[in-house]
Image (tube, helix red, strand yellow):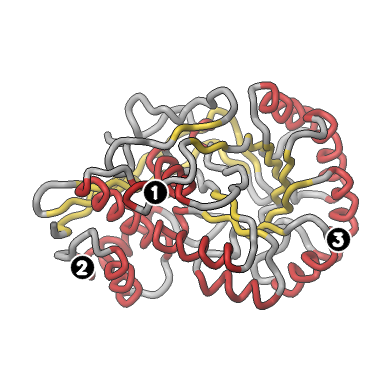
């Protein structure tokens, strides 16, 4: 097997309803769908998404990096040599982790398909046959957010993630209302997407702890490592880091600074190679792992399912249910557009990612 060609397609998909975070509200998103082809005609799939304003990469920047830098560096290599391919990509151009993740995931799909194995088995085996995911509540009115959270629980969700980070007083009232609506037996996660500032939010975060949050995610800007370390020390709630972690170097720096309490691993940021590195470091540091979502289509969701299945030990509820917010998927007859009872998806059993289009 030798890598030969990469086909890229942009696809805008509207959301079922607006989804708000601390910095923006989204009514749809542009996805990048990739098909990596070998000389023998075999193909591997991957997807990505516009990361702005979470990060600097967009479909346009990824397309340029993939076509002009990454494919010339790896063309002719065997897709099963994923470590070599990762090294060649890193040597070709620094940064651009999401573009590199496209190649990495597609190569893993190719390698597992060539072996005739589902990806989780190709990676060493599954510790679970199904994976649960959280219901995610975007920023809206308090009444709407409360109702959406309650609906998730009524339909079987055991974990609810709530976006915050706009105003301390308003968010505190919302979190209290949502906790009352979902009851005490449901995991509640709070995600500020860098929307907080330490001086204004530390007293509010302490008050929010009375609502028993499971995690407080990325409350401060990624550059405020010192402030995040103060939050880690001041709060009982673990600080879950997302935007601040792309690479093993990022995670190691946060661990040394005492600025991380849990790790959100997103395959579209890391690829499978990088995700496995992060998971190994997190386990060694005794940090909880959340397998997260960056607005994937069904392709990326399948990849995340395989990865989550391979993680040993107790696994925190994942956050890979984003396709349920899409009006359509790039996959025909996609199994990921609707939330099943219990908010749990089975791990794919077909070769590779187990999806095609």
Q: Position of residue 206 (x, y in %)?
A: 88, 55
Q: Secondary structure at mark 2?
A: helix
Give the answer, above or below, for where 169 lies relative to 154.
below
Asked whether disc 1 touches disc 2, contact meaning CB atoms under 8 Å apart, the reply is: no
Q: Nearer the viewer, residue 41 or 184?
A: 184
**Residue pictured at 54% horizontal, 67% vertical:** 281
Nearest to the eye among marks 1 and 2: give it. Answer: 1
> Which comes before the other along the chain, label 3 or label 1?
1
Q: Can you identify the residue that label 1 sits on?
A: 125
On the picture, is 234 further left or further right than 294?
right
Q: Residue at x 44, y 63 (%)?
A: 274
Q: Do labels 3 and 1 touch, CB within 8 Å?
A: no
Question: On screen, 263 above or below 328?
Answer: below
**Rendering coords of residue 297 (x, y %):** 42, 39
The residue that disc 3 covers is 202
- Among the two numbered marks 3 and 2 on one chain, the one whose residue lies closer to the N terminus: 2
Tell me the SS state at disc 1.
loop
Residue farthest to the left? Answer: 40
């Amino acid at each position: 097997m030798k890598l030969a060609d990469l086909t890229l397609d942009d696809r805008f998909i509207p959301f079922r309803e607006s989804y708000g975070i601390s910095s923006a509200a989204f009514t749809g998103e542009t996805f990048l769908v990739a098909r990596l082809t070998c000389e023998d005609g075999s193909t591997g799939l991957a997807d990505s998404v516009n990361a702005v304003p979470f990060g600097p990469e967009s479909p346009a920047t990824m397309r340029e990096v993939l076509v002009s830098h990454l494919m010339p560096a790896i063309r002719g290599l065997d897709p099963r040599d994923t470590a070599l391919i990762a090294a060649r990509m890193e040597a070709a151009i620094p940064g651009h982790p999401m573009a590199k993740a496209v190649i990495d995931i597609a190569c893993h799909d190719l390698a597992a398909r060539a072996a005739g194995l589902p990806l989780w088995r190709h990676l060493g085996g599954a510790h679970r046959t199904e994976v649960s995911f959280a219901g995610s509540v975007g920023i809206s009115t308090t009444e709407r957010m409360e109702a959406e959270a309650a609906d998730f629980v009524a339909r079987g969700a055991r974990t609810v993630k709530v976006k915050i980070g706009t105003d301390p007083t308003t968010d505190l009232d919302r979190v209290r209302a949502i906790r009352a609506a979902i009851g005490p037996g449901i995991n509640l996660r709070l995600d500020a997407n860098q929307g907080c500032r330490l001086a204004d939010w530390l007293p509010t975060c302490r008050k929010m702890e009375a609502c028993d949050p499971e995690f407080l995610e990325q409350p401060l800007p990624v550059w405020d490592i010192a402030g995040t370390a103060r939050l880690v020390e001041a709060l009982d709630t673990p600080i879950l880091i997302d935007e601040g972690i792309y690479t093993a170097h990022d995670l190691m720096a946060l661990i040394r600074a005492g600025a991380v309490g849990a790790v959100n691993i997103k395959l579209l940021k890391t690829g499978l190679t990088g995700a496995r590195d992060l998971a190994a470091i997190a386990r060694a540091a005794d940090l909880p792992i959340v397998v997260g979502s960056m607005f994937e289509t069904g392709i990326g969701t399948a990849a995340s399912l395989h990865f989550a299945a391979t993680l040993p030990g107790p696994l925190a509820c994942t956050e890979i249910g984003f396709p349920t917010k899409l009006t359509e998927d790039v996959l025909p007859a996609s199994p990921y557009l609707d939330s099943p009872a219990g908010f749990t998806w089975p791990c794919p059993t077909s070769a590779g990612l187990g999806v095609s289009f």
